[in-house]
Amino acid sequence: MLKTSILAITLILTVTIGTAVAGDCSNENFFGTYTRVDPATDVFGDGLVNHQYVYQLVLTSSGSVYQYWTGLPDYQLTFGSGTPSIGSWECRSDGKLIVNVITSVLAPVGPDEHIASPDLSLSGYYRSTYLFKINGRNKMTRIQARTRTYGPDEDPTNTAGGTLGALSTTQIVYNRLLASDADLLVP
């Protein structure tokens, strides 16, 4: 009887601790800034210009989301640009985090009698939906993503509009950007 009780208590503690360590979005320990670093990109394909881009994802306690990609302003007059992704998040009943963001896409425009050249023009919108698994206080994994694409004359808040893209199940890890004074303490 004692062995059975100890085994049951050990099993309960293991499951409870495992769940607490794994985390979910209902525990409110996930707010903050997370980053993911993309592999270095050969921008022009010539082996000469390699840039390291970073995604910065901010989750606020109010339910707002802000995501910025450091590649947005890189060669914007040549390749185009966009705005940061702004939106909201919500906890699902299974403890996973759902995020919806809208981004505008800007494309370069050529010479035109009404437009100073070079310039950028609104070419459309992306409405992206991400599903995250909370791995703990300092890590999240994006487990699904899908984007709707809208034209510049369409409403990106219309969930039935635009063109729905393919579902991505590629897992991408985001790590919390931790505040540290380590650099200030180096002599």
Image (cartoon, rainbow, N blue to C red):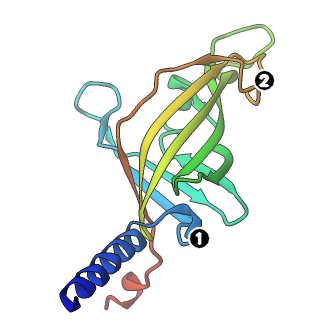
Q: Is disc 2 placed on a helix, strand or loop?
A: loop
Along the viewing direction, whichever of 154 and 62 lies nearer the viewer:
62
Q: Is disc 1 placed on a helix, strand or loop?
A: loop
The disc at residue 67 is none
Q: Earlier in the sequence, mark 1 or mark 2?
A: 1
Amino acid type, callout 2: Asp
Label 2 sits on residue: 155
What percent of the width, then of the height, locates residue 138?
A: 42, 68
Q: Is residue 115 above or below residue 172?
A: above
What percent of the width, then of the height, locates residue 91?
A: 61, 55
Q: Is residue 9 above or below residue 156?
A: below
Mark 1 neighbour class, 10 Å CA radius: few under 14, some 14 to 19, many 20 or more: few
**Which residue, as the protein is rendered here, is positioned at the far right?**
114
Residue 181 in the figure: left or right of residue 11: right
Label 1 sits on residue: 28
Q: Residue at x 68, y 49 (%)?
A: 88
